[in-house]
Image (cartoon, rainbow, N blue to C red):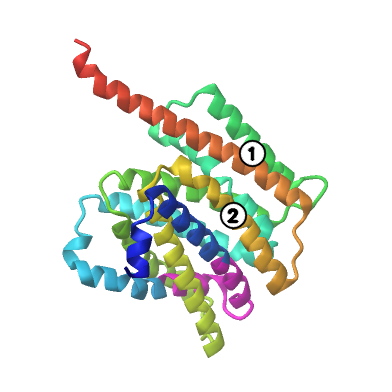
């Protein structure tokens, strides 16, 4: 039996966990690589190369399945997802060059908190008091990381918060797409739509990368694309509430890489705040999963109640 066959024969929850851990490790590599290569290549250009090289990575998937694989009736929603996701990426890639990596990762955990707010405002989703309390506690965790009045709140911090808001809107779009679209198509459209749009701002700051920088740009693209694929695979193998707790591994992975590569020592309060944010996010995910299962059970039993 090959290694791939043995992997596929593992229990689905374990496969999902391994995919999630792979995604967190690759994401941490991508963040560190962005910080490293941005010393020579402008961050707008890094965003463009991340998406351009991502096209070559997902290209074989499209070639194997044929252009019919891209056929969809939801192109408008894909376009909105691209607008939100690309805006978030531009802000994130710049902010991570001027903010300690551990702080950047900690603040990225606020995205699920903003998802609750976005779902209420745009989807008119009903949210109970427990989820609102968890959301408020999570934002309190963000304040622990930032500590306004004690530590300086920088432009990078504000961009990270704005990036999380746009990412939340992108996540809601992905949730809507995933009802009918396979994970590979969602990732494929991400790089296909992101690439030409990200080329426009890159032109205004263009600098030809050296061979060394080109290598690191490939690392950014490869790590980012495969992290996204692993993440979507994890969610397709198990409930989000089961695998999302492992997403917290992004913080120790990123902190370790930042210490080794950039001699950054994370602040104690960064870990405390990140833990508060993350526990709140996990609670929200579990409540959302419970509510969804309850609604499905009610919908299933309704025809039989008469």
Between disc 1 and disc 2, the foreground one is: 2
Instruction: Estimate the x, y position of residue 36 in percent, counting from the top left.
Output: 62, 75
Magenta-drawn segment: 29-51
Residue 258 appears in which quarter of the rendering? bottom right
Residue 245 appears in which quarter of the rendering? top right
Residue shown at 64% from the left, 52% from the top: 106
Distance between the alpha carbons at the discs numbered 1 and 2 = 20 Å
Instruction: Please state which of residues 115 and 76 is positioned toward the viewer in this rendering.
Output: 115
Say what secondary structure mark 2 lies in. Answer: helix
* Residue 77 among those drawn in magenta: no
Q: Which residue is mark 2?
A: 249
Residue shown at 54% from the left, 79% from the top: 216
Residue reaching furthest to the right: 150
Residue shown at 25% from the left, 50% from the top: 74
- State left or right for residue 148 relative to residue 70: right
Label located before the other in sequence (1 or 2): 1
- State left or right for residue 79 relative to residue 65: right
Residue reaching furthest to the front: 1
- State left or right for residue 59 relative to residue 249: left
Q: Quadrant of the C terminus?
A: top left
Residue 61 appears in which quarter of the rendering? bottom left
Residue reaching furthest to the bottom: 211
Q: Which residue is mark 1?
A: 139
């Amino acid at each position: 039996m090959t290694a791939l066959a043995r992997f596929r024969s593992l229990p689905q929850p374990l496969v999902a966990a391994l995919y999630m851990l792979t995604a967190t490790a690759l994401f941490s590599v991508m963040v560190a690589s962005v910080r490293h290569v941005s010393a020579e290549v402008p961050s707008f250009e890094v965003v463009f190369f991340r998406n351009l090289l991502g096209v070559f990575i997902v290209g074989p998937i499209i070639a194997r399945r044929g252009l019919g694989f891209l056929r969809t009736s939801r192109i408008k929603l894909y376009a909105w997802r691209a607008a939100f996701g690309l805006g978030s990426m531009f802000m994130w890639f710049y902010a991570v060059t001027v903010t300690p990596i551990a702080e950047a990762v900690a603040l990225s955990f606020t995205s699920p908190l903003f998802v609750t707010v976005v779902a209420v405002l745009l989807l008119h989703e009903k949210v109970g008091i427990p989820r609102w309390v968890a959301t408020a506690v999570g934002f309190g965790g963000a304040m622990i990381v930032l500590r306004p009045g004690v530590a300086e709140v920088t432009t990078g911090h504000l961009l990270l918060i704005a990036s999380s808001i746009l990412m939340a809107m992108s996540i809601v779009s992905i949730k809507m797409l995933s009802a009918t679209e396979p994970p590979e198509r969602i990732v494929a459209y991400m790089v296909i739509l992101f690439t030409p749009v990200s080329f426009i701002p890159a032109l205004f700051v263009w600098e030809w990368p050296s061979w060394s920088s080109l290598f690191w740009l490939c690392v950014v693209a490869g790590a980012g694309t495969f992290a996204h694929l692993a993440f979507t695979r994890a969610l397709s193998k198990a409930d989000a509430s089961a695998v999302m707790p492992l997403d917290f591994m992004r913080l120790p992975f990123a902190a370790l890489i930042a210490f080794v590569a950039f001699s950054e020592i994370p602040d104690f309060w960064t870990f405390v705040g990140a833990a508060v944010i993350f526990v709140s996010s996990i609670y929200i995910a579990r409540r959302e999963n419970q509510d969804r299962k309850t609604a499905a059970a009610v919908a299933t039993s309704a025809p039989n109640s008469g």
